[in-house]
Image (cartoon, rainbow, N blue to C red):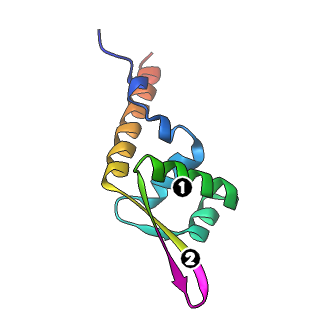
Amino acid sequence: MMAHPRHGLDPALQTPVRFSLLAALGTDRELDFATLRDFLETDDSSVSKAVTALESAGYVAVTKGYVGNRPRTWVRATAAGRRAFAAHVTALQAIAAAAVAD
């Protein structure tokens, strides 16, 4: 018997903001914090918590710097994050396919 595809879901990506954040970063994109916040249509706190969780999982890399005198934070997906995202999407598709097949 094959394992249910839900076992392929990544706990680090099971919140909508974390999943959406990693999706927004795509395969080779670095976005600043404010752009992520606006794109995800959420608040600073939610983005900050998502970035912290994904960084702890090794799924994003954070770079801090300045533009002029203003501090900025940039976020990009790591190779591990891109692999985890792809595996998570594959599991979601398998779950959905099973539901549609019934």
Q: At which x and y percent is residue 82?
A: 35, 51
Tell me if 58 is positioned left or right of 74 in this view.
Answer: left
Q: Which residue is mark 2?
A: 72
Name the residue rendered at 57%, 40% in the picture: 15
10 Å neighbourhood of mark 2: few (<14), some, or many (≥20)? some
- In front of the other: 48 or 40: 48
Q: Say which amino acid is labelled 1.
A: Val
Q: At which x and y percent is residue 18?
A: 54, 48
Of mark 2 and mark 1, the one earlier in the sequence is 1
Report if residue 18 is visible in the image.
Answer: yes
Name the residue rendered at 61%, 57% in the picture: 47
Name the residue rendered at 50%, 79% in the picture: 65
Q: Which residue is mark 1?
A: 51
Q: Which image quadrant for residue 34?
A: bottom right
Q: Which image quadrant for residue 73?
A: bottom right
Q: Give the magenta-colored segment's residue range.
A: 63-71
- In front of the other: 97 or 22: 22
Q: Say which amino acid is labelled 2.
A: Arg
Name the residue rendered at 59%, 49% in the picture: 17
Mark linked to residue 102: none
Q: At which x and y percent is residue 52?
A: 54, 53
Q: Is residue 36 above or below residue 15?
A: below
Asked if the magenta segment contains residue 95, the reply would be no
Secondary structure of the residue carrying numbered label 1: helix
Q: Residue furthest bottom?
A: 68
